[in-house]
Image: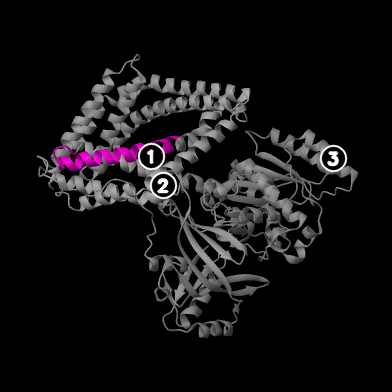
């Protein structure tokens, strides 16, 4: 069921209601209603063509999900769902879970109003229903909202009664308008329908001076850092820290590639500052990943899940402590001043010292050189890794792969979309293998450390034995990633990859 | 879309009551729900205050050029739509026999709606007929209401045997007790013995309740007029149990 909204600039509401009553429609009593639009910070529901709103009337609250076909979904809820897991098991949760994943549902805009139902019945049942909203208040100036709105529900099988009501409304001086009351409130508040896009790509021209291109990319990354800052401090959901950390890593990577482009002093100062920021975010993120991956780790030894509960509880405790420490670090005046100073410099990238030697070289050529070199470093290191190479070499290779990936992503505005996506897919396949290996190694170390702690606190023997089994599982996972590396790298270190990269870089205008 | 049918070989065991109340609960928890009334008695249609009229009748609906969508009606509960029944459904078997691959016809009619709905409930007439065979092909699960009496218990045996004889794997069988009166020793004994014999029985038991009888007066699902009644709570729990069985935790 969709709805159609009608508004009027000059037909007074009392006259409209009287006109409807005169036509035989029943006008119900008014009730106060609040409607709140929910979506993730990055607008995942909107991106999937869905809209979720929470409606509260008195002490009754419901979640309404529309989009994805003509039939809406409405679930009675006791509280505003914060995460998809707050919804009851069933189709709605199953439908939203892959879209929303671990992200929190946040209120984007709210509107409060007085609502009356306008209905007509036939043989004991309602065949048409409209909602009249007036006294609208929201996150905007009162005069930005219409004096009243009328939403006519289009009910399957009852098209004619709905059409008749719409004709009556037009006769009473109302006009059909796009969207609904909540849409109108959102537009009036200046809130965008989508969310914040943390993707690093911006339009770039190959012939601009390299210093301006690099500053534009870094400026875009700085926006992502700023946008995700408070959500990280408040630990709203794990993706805020993830996106903050990725933006910081990309910033560090671009700074490391900015030799001879940015003023040396600026580059040096901010490489240190962002390294500190990156290091500060590490422990909390590692523990976030641990919690997120936990059910996958434990699945092969599901029969020991109960024995492992104290371990999960300890990991979660450490996670909370790490997040509190992170919030403290991000809240310091020093951190805030560093970010502000960085943003000020980005607004004038030629300030802060003598320009780099290649500051005015064309951006396109500078980026092509760097991508070529990063690919060369990655291949050389990969070829040097054998079965006996220490795990540390794979970790270094992971860093090399990230450097290349970030160059392609951050300067993706210079590269043709199809070729870029195809090349990144190849690189991703290698990175996933390296990532699995690294995560398993880190988590094994953490588990060993944790086991020592738990033993000191008198943990039960079954728990310690279960930890041993889990370490065994993770070691197997690490080893299997290690065994797979040779083939994954061989697939990457191939003619197809070389051709794909050449095509990509040839498309960058000199 | 998951397709469920309330089905029993016996009449009067609570198929329509279960279909109507479970469909209402499904919609109340946010499932986009379709209830298809396949019983010419049209009881589900009556409970939702919808005119029992199918344009062109059952013959047109299941005919080779037929479709389900033109027959869909909204109910007064948002998220729950109904395909009403009328008396032309008494000849549904004959009309199905006239089409190619009759046992697949109901499934084919539901296919175009698969993206619009999360769950479809089919309220089936009693008996084993061509219509029932078509239902068995179309559904993911059969919700089988069972009054804890000896005769009802036989119907589970007969149904299970029939499904075993069908080609391919049949739908999941989800029997549940209805019209349970805990004061009756026979009811208590049969609930225990049947649950042991058929471990697939749902844990939730629907009690014999005056609220259910009042559905005919109120012409609404129980939760709409008696949300705190034992019957409403039982249907809520039965839906939760069914949802976990079909969509997981």
Q: Secondary structure at mark 3?
A: helix
Residue B66 falls in which quadrant of the image?
bottom right
Question: Dot 2, how many residues are within 10 Å of its Cα: few (below 14), some (14-19), or many (20+)?
Answer: many
Chain of the residue under label 1: A
Q: Quadrant location of the C terminus of chain B?
A: top right
Q: Position of residue B102 (x, y in %)?
A: 61, 45
Specify the subunit that label 2 lies on: A
Residue located at (56% from left, 27% from top): A454
**Residue A49 visible somewhere in the drawing:** yes
> Tag 2, which secondary structure?
helix
Between B141 and A88, the one nearer to me in the picture: A88
Q: Which residue is mark 3?
A: B190
Q: Position of residue A510 (x, y in %)?
A: 11, 41
Q: Is residue A71 visible from the viewing direction of this image? A: no
In the image, is B213 to the left or to the right of A263? Answer: right
Dots 2, 3 in contact, CB < 8 A: no
Q: Are marks 1 and 2 on the same chain?
A: yes
Q: Residue at x 18, y 36 (%)?
A: A505
* Marked residue nearer the N-terminal end (1 or 2): 2
Q: Secondary structure at mark 1?
A: helix
Assess disc 1: are there few (<14), some (14-19) or many (≥20) residues with their C-alpha within 10 Å of its C-alpha.
many
Q: Which residue is mark 2?
A: A232
Please tell me whether residue A267 belongs to the stretch shown in magenta. Answer: yes
CA gap, disc 1 and disc 2: 10 Å
Q: Are marks 2 and 3 on the same chain?
A: no
| Relative to B14, B134 lies left or right | left
Q: Which residues, given as a range, are shown in magenta?
A: A258-286
Pointer 3 and pointer 1 on the same chain: no
């Amino acid at each position: 069921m969709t709805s159609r909204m009608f508004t009027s600039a000059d037909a007074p509401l009392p006259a409209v209601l009287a006109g409807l009553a005169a036509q035989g429609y029943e006008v119900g009593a008014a009730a106060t209603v609040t409607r709140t639009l929910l979506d993730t910070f990055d607008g995942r529901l909107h991106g999937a063509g869905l809209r979720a709103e929470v409606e509260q009337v008195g002490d009754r609250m419901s979640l309404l999900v529309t989009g994805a076909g003509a039939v809406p979904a409405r679930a009675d809820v006791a509280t505003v769902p914060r995460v998809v897991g707050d919804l009851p098991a069933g189709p709605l949760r199953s439908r939203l879970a892959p879209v929303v994943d671990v992200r929190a549902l946040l209120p984007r805009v709210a509107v409060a109003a007085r609502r009356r139902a306008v209905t007509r019945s036939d043989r004991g049942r309602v065949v048409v229903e409209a909602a009249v909203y007036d006294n609208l208040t929201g996150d905007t100036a009162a005069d930005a909202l219409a004096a009243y709105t009328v939403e006519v529900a289009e009910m399957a099988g009852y098209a004619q009664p709905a059409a008749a009501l719409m004709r009556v409304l037009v006769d009473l001086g109302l006009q059909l308008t796009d969207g609904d009351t909540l849409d109108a409130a959102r537009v009036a508040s200046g809130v965008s329908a989508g969310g914040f896009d943390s993707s690093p790509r911006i339009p770039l021209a190959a012939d601009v001076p390299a210093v301006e291109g690099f500053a534009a990319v870094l400026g875009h990354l700085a926006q992502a850092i700023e946008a995700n800052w408070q959500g990280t401090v408040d630990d709203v959901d794990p993706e805020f820290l993830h996106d903050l950390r990725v933006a910081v890593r990309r910033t560090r990577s671009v700074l490391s590639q900015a030799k001879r482009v940015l003023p040396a002093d600026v580059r040096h100062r901010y490489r240190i500052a962002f390294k500190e920021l990156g290091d500060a975010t590490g422990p909390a993120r590692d523990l976030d990943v641990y919690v997120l991956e936990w059910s996958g780790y434990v699945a092969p030894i599901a029969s020991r899940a109960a024995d492992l509960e104290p371990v999960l509880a300890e990991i979660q405790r450490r996670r909370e402590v790490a997040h509190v420490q992170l919030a403290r670090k991000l809240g310091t005046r020093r951190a805030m001043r560093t970010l502000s100073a960085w943003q000020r410099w980005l607004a004038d990238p030629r300030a802060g010292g003598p320009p780099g030697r290649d500051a005015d070289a064309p951006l396109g050529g500078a980026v092509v050189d760097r991508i070529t070199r990063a690919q060369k470093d990655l291949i050389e290191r990969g070829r040097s890794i054998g079965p006996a190479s220490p795990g540390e070499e794979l970790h270094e290779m992971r860093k090399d792969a990230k450097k290349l990936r970030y160059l392609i992503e951050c300067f993706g505005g210079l590269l043709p979309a199809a070729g870029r996506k195809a090349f990144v897919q190849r690189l991703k396949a290698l990175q996933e293998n390296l990532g699995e290996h690294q995560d398993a190694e880190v988590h094994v170390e953490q588990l060993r450390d944790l086991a020592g702690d738990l033993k000191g606190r008198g943990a039960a023997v079954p728990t310690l034995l279960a930890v041993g089994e889990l370490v065994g599982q993770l070691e197997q996972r690490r080893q299997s990633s290690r065994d797979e590396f040779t083939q994954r790298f061989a697939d990457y270190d191939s003619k197809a990859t070389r051709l794909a990269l050449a095509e990509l870089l040839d498309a960058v205008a000199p | 879309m998951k397709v469920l049918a309330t089905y029993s070989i016996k009449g009067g065991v609570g198929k329509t009551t279960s279909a109507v109340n479970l469909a209402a609960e499904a919609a109340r928890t946010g499932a986009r729900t379709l209830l298809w009334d396949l019983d010419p008695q049209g009881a589900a249609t009556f409970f939702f205050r919808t005119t029992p009229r199918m344009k062109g009748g059952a013959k047109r609906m299941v005919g080779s050029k037929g479709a389900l969508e033109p027959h869909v009606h909204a109910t007064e509960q948002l998220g729950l739509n109904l395909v009403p029944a009328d008396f032309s459904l008494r000849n549904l078997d004959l009309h199905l026999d006239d089409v190619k691959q009759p046992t697949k016809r109901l499934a084919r009619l539901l296919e175009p709606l698969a993206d619009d709905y999360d769950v479809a409930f089919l309220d089936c007439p009693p008996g084993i007929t061509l219509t029932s065979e078509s239902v068995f092909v179309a559904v993911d699960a059969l919700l089988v209401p069972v009054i804890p009496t000896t005769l009802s218990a036989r119907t589970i045996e007969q149904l299970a045997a029939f499904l075993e004889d069908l080609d391919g794997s049949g739908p999941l069988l989800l029997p549940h007790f209805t019209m349970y009166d805990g004061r009756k020793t026979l009811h208590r004994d049969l609930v225990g013995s049947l649950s042991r014999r058929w471990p697939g029985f749902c844990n939730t038991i629907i009690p014999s309740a005056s609220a259910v009888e009042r559905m005919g007066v109120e012409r609404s699902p129980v939760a709409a007029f008696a949300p705190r009644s034992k019957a409403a709570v039982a249907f809520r729990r039965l839906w939760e149990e069914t949802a976990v069985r079909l969509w997981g935790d």
